């Protein structure tokens, strides 16, 4: 089974003015596509991994043959992370989370504002390329992680719910070196219902 680039649920320009269409198009058709291609290349001839999901491989990196473990971590991570990233954004995004997600955020961080502040600081504080993550831990609590490269919380048994790509390729055309401005604008396109669905699936072990 070859891994495939997912279709975006909106047009490239739909997230403008927070993320411009040119950036989205390059990010999806060049960067994400390259992760998919390199993951497929790494898995060639590894029949035992042919039917494994990317999530399964990233959760169990220590079971991946050593000769392709780094490739799966980087390119499988890149594929998984971007697939999640596209889904947690929407032109109808912004506003506030509701229901169980709202309760979980309040329970773990105090308030939405406190959560957003802490998450934004984690995103701004990633040195070089990486991601900020909101993840459900095995303790049932929500956690914020800043992680380098294409690493994600699956590596330590947490389930990613919301991710923000802070590689320069995700914002440089519009924001140049002003990562904090990109982060601040991004909250306007966060699709809370998708994050809520990720939480529900994580709690149900899906
Ligand atoms: Mn990216």
Image (spheres, rainbow, N blue to C red):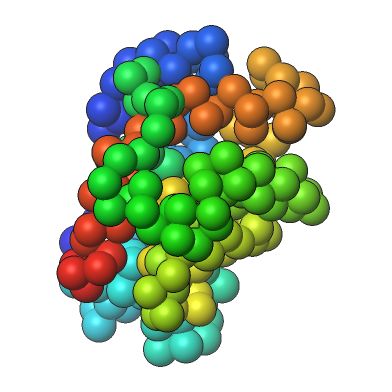
Whether residue 165 sits left or right of residue 199 in the image: it is right
Residue at figure coordinates x 42%, y 26% from the top left: 94
Say if 5 sits above or below 21 in the image: below
Would residue 37 be seen by someone viewing this image from the given angle?
Answer: no
The image quadrant that residue 14 belongs to is top left
The image quadrant that residue 8 belongs to is top left
Residue at figure coordinates x 45%, y 61% from the top left: 107
Whether residue 16 sits left or right of residue 59 in the image: it is right
Residue at figure coordinates x 18%, y 69% from the top left: 204
Whether residue 129 sits left or right of residue 206 in the image: it is right
Q: Quadrant of the N terminus?
A: bottom left
Whether residue 164 sits left or right of residue 51 in the image: it is right
Say if 37 sits above or below 73 in the image: above
Point out residue 124 in the picture as x, y percentages from the top left corner: 74, 43
In this view of the protein, which residue sits in the foreground, 131 or 25?
131
Q: Quadrant of the C terminus?
A: bottom left
Point out residue 47 in the picture as x, y percentages from the top left corner: 24, 78
Would residue 159 be seen by someone viewing this image from the given angle?
Answer: yes
Say if 121 sits above or below 206 in the image: above
The image shows a total of numbered marks equal to: 0
In this view of the protein, which residue sits in the foreground, 154 or 30?
154
Say if 132 sits above or below 91 in the image: below
Residue at figure coordinates x 33%, y 19% from the top left: 92
Point out residue 134 in the picture as x, y percentages from the top left corner: 49, 56
Point out residue 160 in the picture as x, y percentages from the top left corner: 42, 60
């Amino acid at each position: 089974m070859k891994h495939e680039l997912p279709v975006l649920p909106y047009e490239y320009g739909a997230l403008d003015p927070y993320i411009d269409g040119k950036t989205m198009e390059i990010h999806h058709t060049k960067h994400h596509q390259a992760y998919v291609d390199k993951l497929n290349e790494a898995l060639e001839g590894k029949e035992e991994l042919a039917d494994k999901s990317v999530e399964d491989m990233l959760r169990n990196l220590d079971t991946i043959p050593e000769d392709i473990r780094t490739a799966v971590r980087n390119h499988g991570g890149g594929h998984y992370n971007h697939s999640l990233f596209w889904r947690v954004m929407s032109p109808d995004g912004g506003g506030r989370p509701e229901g169980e997600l709202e309760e979980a955020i309040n329970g773990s961080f105090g308030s939405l504002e406190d959560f957003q502040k802490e998450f934004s600081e984690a995103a701004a504080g990633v040195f070089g390329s990486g991601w900020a993550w909101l993840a459900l831990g095995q303790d049932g609590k929500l956690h914020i992680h800043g992680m380098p490269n294409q690493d994600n919380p699956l590596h330590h048994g947490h389930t990613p719910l919301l991710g923000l790509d802070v590689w320069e390729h995700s914002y440089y055309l519009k924001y140049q070196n002003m990562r904090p401005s990109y982060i601040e604008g991004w909250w306007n396109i966060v699709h809370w219902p998708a994050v809520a669905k990720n939480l529900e699936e994580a709690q149900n072990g899906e």
